[in-house]
Image: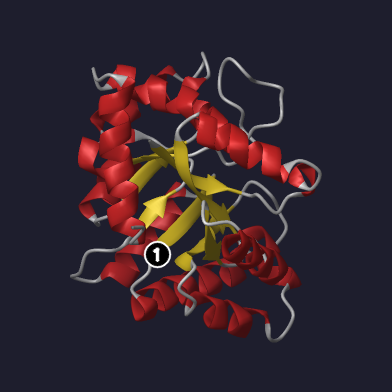
Amino acid sequence: MLIDTHAHLDEQSFHLDLEAVLQNAREAQVESILSIGITAETSQAAVELAKRYPQIHAVAGIQPNYVAEMKPNDFALIEELAALDCVVGIGETGLDRYWDHAPIDLQREFFIKHIELSQRTEKPFIVHCRDAEADVVGVLKECAGDEQLNGVMHSFCGDSATAETCLELGLHISFAGMVTFKKNEELREVAKMVPLNRILVETDSPYLSPVPLRGKRNEPANVVHTARCLADLHGLTLDEFAIASTANAKTLFSIA
């Protein structure tokens, strides 16, 4: 059994066939899916999905590209949602220098606020990082102080030095379909060095479909392809990798 630790099931592309998508996941032995918020509205939508479907757990937060569009009470809503039992994590949060949608100082302010909310609620935070590895590591070190952090580097595509630092800070590292792409040999080398007790797997559905499904809408059932790639890199069977990564996800997100 696998856990897809990062999907966006509230996306419009799932509106017409979500029931079938969830059935596909069950048939692929994907027992749980984390549906991730990127705005106050999508975080609320993730909560509604989690209340409706036992297979889904919600994560509430405001993604860095959307912090400039926040309404005055949006983060207060995230704080309210974070207290719910069906919300198992905070995010996604982080920094993004690829898109010019929000000033980096504002992104940084709310990245820290999400981490502080994670620390108050004792629920892990999920980090979005794009072209901002050094900045993200700087914030993580600042927030960690002398303590270990409780979070995930989502859809990791950084280098080995960034991965090592994140592991030293206590974070888990999650890989999405990009690790299966033929050109990403360096990323596969990074995946090899992540300890088995700190690795997670995800789809980032409906984006980043893994090989052999590139170009198609991604969905949680497809996490098996990424898991098989990671299993091969670690010299494990798919079942062995599934047992390890699922145990990691259940412990980190307090999923029964």
**Figure quadrant of the N terminus:** top left
Task: Give residue 3's position: percent from left, percent from top.
Answer: 43, 42
Q: Is residue 159 left or right of residue 243?
A: right
Task: Tell me, yes or no, if residue 205 can be seen here.
Answer: no
Answer few, some or many: residues within 10 Å of disc 1's Cα (few below 14, many 20 plus, some between 14 and 19): some
Q: Quadrant of residue 122?
A: bottom left
Residue at screen point 38% across, 69% down: 123
Colour scheme employed for the rendering of this structure: secondary structure
Disc 1: which residue: 139
- Give residue 121's position: percent from left, percent from top: 38, 78
Tell me what residue is drawn at x 49 percent, y 34 percent.
176
Type of amino acid at the residue the image marks with label 1? Val
For the residue pair 80 and 125, the one nearer the viewer reads as 80
Above or below, 43 relative to 194: below
Residue under the point 74% across and 44% down = 14
89 sits to left or right of 252? right
Answer above or below: position of 193 versus 117: above
Q: Residue furthest left?
A: 146
The C terminus lies in which quarter of the figure?
bottom left
User: Residue at point 23% right, 36% down?
Assistant: 196
In the rendered view, would you say 17 is above or below 251?
A: above
Tell me which corner region of the image, top left, top right, bottom left or bottom right, holds residue 174. top left
- 18 and 245: which is toward the camera: 18
155 above or below 143? above
What x and y, as percent, mark residue 223? 50, 31
Q: Nearer the viewer, residue 247 or 142?
A: 247
